């Protein structure tokens, strides 16, 4: 698409969020708010064993409970649904299909084995307690090592050796790189599993109208069109009679990108019963069954010169995929890690191997910044290289970072970098930190018996990435549509396939439209979350796309409608289009404000009497724009983290956290800062507190917030944020920023922990989370269990 003048005006202002009017007054509509006449309630009875054959199910007592409407076993549900399949034409991918409710075998604690539908949730749960199930226990596979071991129990017949996928890719001459190396620096990390935990858990309300055959599913989802597309096939329902909607959504963090077996069961149950059926998982179900992420083990070997210059890198990754595949396939996560891991550094040679392994755990899901482990291991490796070469962590980065002067250039993974400012954010970060003072403070603290740590890190984020990048990952990039309509009264409605859940789309997209069309910010409505109204897209909200892609779609759509308005006004006002301007909903002649016509007057004429409008003009006041991303791009940031370790309790306190970020042109700085702070909170919580832990027998050990710890305000200091705001010559110079804090904060934090440990002669962190107990083990205060 052609370019144009830069967006300005409201864009860049700290406009108050439109969403807050609803959210803060408690007038939003979430799934649990839905109360339809005659609505029934669902409860899933879930497996209590990690791996076993179902030998018998007796649901007779449950069916006799007053108020129970239907009880669906696996066999009952399979009679009215197709098995879920997420198979993709990816060479070597083993992606088993599976039923909405377990039929013969259960493969993780929490897997649904019976669905009870009753007049209330209380009745459904009471009835479920009467169901008797017997299992023939099978040996569970609870780690990638166990899954790959010779003679390991096979989870699926069509996943030989429990290997979902394995691959190796080589870039450059890796053997030559290691032959020339002065040092070979090795590092391993075993990252733990942690969960998304949005405030609103998964859920949906399905309504089947027996007269019309229409099925409507109101869901808490990030992507309504994908959900509709997949569910229609699995429940054998005509897609033209299937509508999926989403209203307010209490967070997603990647969890709600996929369709789940519970969605299938709820919609199929509504259709079978002929009414409205509601399901909302409780927190226990969420923790046990919704899935988790981040469970990967990586080993890195770096070939480096004596001065710390990178020559080559070998990486081996194992990913614990859990039992059942969901969308997207786990190969996408491996591809993201492989493609992104070189980051903003010059790297002449690179080898990457991965093994994705099936285990008896809940599914591996997308979690905010699903490639994050690459930044974590790379930035910690840079610190270890610095230590090996006897230089500072700052110097080792400066010697290897790609600067703006180096660009455009290719990453070793064949992805073009242009307008990437990671080096510049890092330079600014260093300027803002007195490193000598940091070391003096640490020495003084040790003299007092206190232990301080300091760490840094930098990264680039595909937000939204580029066509080359996503091709290398093995995932479609896709353009972004938006339909914009000038209503009969001159107000504006925009329809987006985005399904926002905290990203402030209603605010930022309104800012863009207001600037482009010259209408009031409050005269714009953003419509989302309705497959009957919004343009089709299989991507929805995720992957930090919206800041570029959705913004581009509304800008181009607005510009087309602006062009139409000005052409019509030029005839009415007898002036050249070039002499016209639009402000406050009025088209006027520049320098002659008395010569003007309201947008509302033009719109009314176009809608009511198009034949009376100036001949040869386009009177369609609605337009669907598709934005290709202008090549896409990256966000970047650098973080610095100061910590203090309590050597008696093992508690880690973050004393200060500094961010220098560059997401290009900020549409709303307040929104950007909110996303950065929220991302850092999630990353810190994931490293220090949260753990989706399993016992050796497959029992889930963190099934409530008594055991699964979440971060709160006292765990975080005030986050200091500096914006660079590098602007390119593209029409939309904005990049995504929602995932960066979760990706980079763990690296800066663990580097600070390693720095503290080094001061007392202890080894680096090799596994996470770094709980107080683990910190005491690292300090040698207690023995490792």
Image: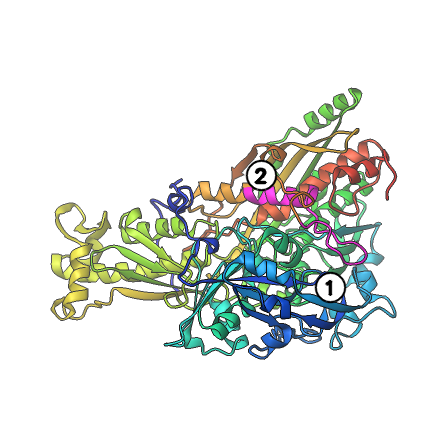
Q: Distance between the residues labelled 1 and 2?
A: 34 Å
* Res 387 → quadrant: top right
Q: Quadrant of residue 425?
A: top right
- Report the side of 153 relative to 2 (left or right): right
Q: How is the image coloured?
A: rainbow
Residue 587: give x, y in percent of width and height: 19, 52
SS class, disc 1: loop
Specify whether residue 692 is painted magenta: yes
SS of the residue at dot 2? strand
Residue at image x 72%, y 55%?
Answer: 295
For label 2, the residue is 659
Labels 1 & 2 near each other (Cβ < 8 A): no
Region rendered in magenta: 678-703
Identify the residue at image location x=77%, y=31%.
649
User: Residue at image x 69%, y 42%?
Assistant: 689
Q: Is residue 78 visible?
A: yes
The crowding category of the residue bearing disc 2, from other C-alpha atoms within 10 Å (few below 14, some 14 to 19, many at least 20), is: many
User: Where residue 172 is drawn, which disc sits there?
Assistant: 1
Front: mark 1 or 2: 2
Q: Is residue 695 left or right of residue 240?
A: right
Judging depth in this view, the residue of 154 and 126 nearest the camera is 126
Magenta-colored stretch includes residue 232: no
Residue 7 visible somewhere in the drawing: no
Q: Where is residue 488 in the image (x, y as percent from the top left)?
A: 20, 60
Residue 210 appears left or right of 294:
left
User: Dot 1 surroundings within 10 Å: few (below 14), some, or many (20 or more)?
Assistant: some
Residue 441 badge: none
């Amino acid at each position: 698409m052609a370019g144009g003048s830069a967006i300005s005006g409201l864009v860049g202002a700290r406009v108050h969020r439109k969403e807050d009017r609803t959210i803060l007054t408690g007038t939003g509509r979430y799934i649990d708010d839905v109360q339809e006449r005659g609505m029934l309630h669902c409860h899933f009875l879930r497996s209590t064993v990690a791996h076993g054959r179902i030998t018998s199910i007796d649901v007779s007592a449950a069916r006799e409970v007053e108020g129970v409407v239907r009880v669906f076993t696996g066999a009952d549900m399979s009679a009215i649904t197709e098995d879920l399949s997420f198979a993709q034409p990816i060479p070597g991918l083993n992606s088993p299909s599976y039923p909405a409710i377990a039929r013969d075998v259960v493969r993780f604690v929490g897997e649904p084995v019976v669905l009870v539908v009753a007049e209330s949730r209380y009745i459904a749960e009471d009835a479920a307690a009467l169901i008797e199930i017997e299992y023939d226990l099978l040996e569970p596979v609870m780690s990638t090592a166990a899954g790959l071991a010779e003679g390991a129990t096979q989870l699926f017949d069509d996943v030989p050796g429990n290997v979902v996928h394995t691959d190796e890719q080589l870039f450059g001459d890796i053997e030559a790189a290691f032959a020339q190396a002065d040092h070979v620096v090795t590092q391993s990390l075993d990252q733990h599993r942690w969960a998304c935990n949005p405030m609103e858990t998964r859920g949906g309300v399905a309504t089947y109208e027996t007269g019309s055959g229409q099925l409507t599913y109101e869901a808490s989802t990030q992507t309504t069109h994908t959900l509709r597309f997949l569910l229609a096939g699995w429940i054998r329902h005509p897609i033209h009679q299937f509508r999926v909607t989403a209203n307010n959504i209490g967070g997603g963090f990647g969890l709600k990108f996929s369709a789940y077996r519970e969605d299938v069961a709820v919609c199929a149950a509504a259709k079978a019963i002929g009414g409205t059926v509601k399901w909302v998982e409780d927190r226990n179900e969420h923790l046990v069954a919704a899935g988790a992420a981040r469970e990967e083990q990586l080993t890195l070997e770096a070939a480096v010169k004596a001065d710390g210059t990178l020559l080559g890198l070998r990486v081996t990754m194992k990913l614990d995929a859990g039992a059942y595949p969901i969308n997207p396939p786990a190969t996408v996560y491996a591809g993201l890690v492989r493609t992104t891991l070189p980051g903003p550094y010059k790297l002449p040679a690179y080898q990457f191997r991965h093994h994705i392994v099936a285990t008896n755990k809940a599914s591996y899901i997308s979690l905010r910044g699903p490639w994050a482990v690459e930044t974590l291991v790379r930035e910690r490796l840079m610190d270890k290289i610095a230590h090996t070469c006897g230089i500072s962590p700052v110097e080792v980065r400066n010697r290897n970072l790609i600067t703006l002067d180096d660009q455009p250039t290719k990453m070793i993974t064949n992805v073009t970098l242009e307008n990437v400012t990671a080096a510049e954010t890092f330079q600014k970060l260093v300027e803002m930190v007195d490193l000598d003072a940091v070391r003096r403070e640490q020495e003084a603290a040790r003299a007092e018996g206190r232990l301080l740590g300091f760490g840094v890190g930098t990264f680039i984020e595909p937000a939204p990435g580029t066509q080359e990048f996503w091709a290398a990952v093995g995932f479609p990039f896709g353009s972004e549509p938006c339909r914009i309509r000038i209503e009969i009264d001159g107000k504006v409605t925009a329809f987006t396939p985005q399904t926002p859940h905290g990203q402030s789309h209603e605010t930022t997209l309104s800012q863009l439209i207001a600037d482009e069309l010259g209408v009031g910010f409050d005269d714009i409505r953003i419509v989302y979350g309705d497959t009957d109204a919004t343009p089709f897209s299989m991507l929805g909200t995720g992957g930090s796309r919206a800041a570029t892609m959705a913004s581009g779609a509304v800008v181009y759509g607005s510009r087309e409608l602006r062009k139409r308005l000005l052409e019509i006004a030029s005839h009415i006002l007898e002036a050249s289009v070039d002499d016209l301007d639009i402000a406050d909903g009025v088209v006027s002649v520049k320098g002659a404000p008395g010569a003007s016509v309201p947008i509302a007057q033009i719109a009314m004429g176009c809608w009511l009497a198009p034949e009376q409008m100036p001949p040869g003009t386009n009177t369609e006041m609605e337009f669907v724009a598709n934005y290709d991303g202008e090549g896409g791009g990256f966000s970047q940031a650098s973080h610095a983290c100061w910590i203090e370790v309590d050597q008696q309790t093992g508690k880690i306190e973050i004393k200060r956290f500094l961010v220098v970020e560059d997401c290009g042109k900020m549409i709303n700085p307040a929104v950007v800062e909110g996303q950065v702070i929220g991302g850092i909170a999630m990353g810190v919580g994931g490293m220090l507190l949260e753990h989706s832990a399993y016992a050796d027998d497959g029992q889930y050990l963190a099934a409530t917030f008594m055991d699964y710890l979440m971060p709160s305000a006292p765990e975080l200091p005030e986050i200091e944020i500096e914006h660079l705001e590098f602007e390119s010559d593209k029409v939309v110079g904005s990049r995504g920023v929602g995932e960066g804090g979760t990706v980079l904060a763990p690296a800066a934090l663990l580097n600070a922990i390693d720095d503290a440990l080094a001061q007392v002669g202890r080894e680096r962190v090799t596994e996470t989370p770094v709980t107080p107990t683990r910190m005491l083990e690292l300090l040698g205060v207690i023995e490792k269990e």
